Amino acid sequence: MKKNNLWGEVWAEMLGTMVLILFGTGVVAQVVTGDGAQGDHDSIAWAWGIGVTLGIYVAARISGAHLNPAVTIALAAFKGFEWRKVAPYIAAQVVGAFVAALIVRATYADLIATIDPDHTYDTQGIFSTSPTAGVSIPSAFLDQIVGTAILVFVIFALTTAANNPPMANIGPVVVGLLVVGLGMAFGGNAGYAINPARDFGPRLASWLTGYGDAWLSTSGSHPLYFWLPIVAPIIGGLIGGAMFKYLIENHLPDEPEAITVSEPIQEGPRQVTDTQA
């Protein structure tokens, strides 16, 4: 059996994240440029979930399909993922998100130019998140911690063998539904980035293609905002991972039931992690 190598894992993370962001930013572009006639909040939530599911199917066998730096860091902290792989995985995720956003930017260039020729806050939300008007920066920070903590906590529950989770072939669908649920329940305050690569890569792509204020919030006094969807999700992911590790996993039986999903397995001297995000 052919063994995975880090280069292959990096490519898988990049392409899996690219698929995720193609669907995610693509649906927002369609809704925004169609002025609501071609979708709404629910279609956005569902397309993001579908993008997550398909991105996982692309990458899971090779890299474990983290697709999210917050998940990668939480896996390293609590699930034995190798710390030496954290930086390459995160770089791949950011590059995949960046490339996907450039593709969406080019594909929707005419429609964006029609409704927002000056590339203002009106269409910046296609690519990156921001607090809703009236939501403070502290509230947005808490929102991102809570949303990402839920994401990682449930992902760990869905991918821990001893927890008798869904089988591996259906696991990506359940994770996608998790993201749909988060979008419908926690999308109001700050756009549920819950993924540093998802926000930073497209934000950088938009800045390079005409959105001069891409690093700022699109509401209120327009403070510098790009850092929040990076820092808060990482904190939230660590909180969610710790909660599962110490409040659930430590109390599970040592052995899984006969039919279950597999997650971190040993393959010779290296470890392959089959978890998704």
Image (cartoon, rainbow, N blue to C red):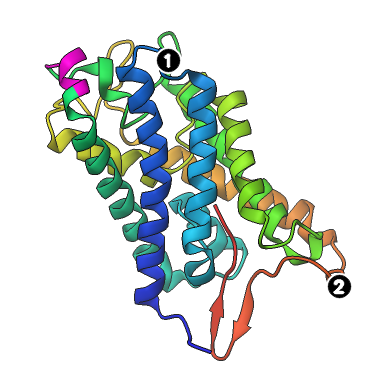
Residue at point 37%, 58% (across, down): 15
Q: Where is residue 218 drawn, in percent x and y? A: 30, 17
The reply to whether callout 1 and callout 2 are in contact (CB within 8 Å) is no
- Residue designated by label 1: 132
147 vs 107, nearest the viewer: 107
Q: Which residues are magenta?
A: 111-117
In the rendered image, which quarter is residue 145 located in? top right
Q: Where is residue 212 drawn, in percent x and y? A: 13, 26
Q: Where is residue 86 drawn, in percent x and y? A: 42, 65
In the rendered image, which quarter is residue 39 located in? top left
SS class of the residue under badge 2? loop
116 vs 217, nearest the viewer: 116
Whether residue 187 is situated above or below residue 77 in the rendered picture: above
SS class of the residue under badge 1? loop
Image position of 142 (left or right of 12):
right
In the rendered image, which quarter is residue 22 located in? top left
What secondary structure characterizes most of the magenta part?
Answer: helix
Amino acid type of the residue tagged 2 in the rendering: Ala
Image position of 96 (left or right of 68):
left
Residue 98 appears anywhere in the view: yes
42 vs 132, nearest the viewer: 42
Label of residue 143 in the image: none
Q: CA distance from mark 1 to mark 2?
A: 47 Å
Residue at point 41%, 71% (across, down): 9
Amino acid type of the residue tagged 1 in the rendering: Thr
- Residue designated by label 2: 258
Q: Where is residue 234 drawn, in percent x and y? A: 48, 46
Residue at point 35%, 25% (across, down): 30
Q: Is residue 114 magenta?
A: yes
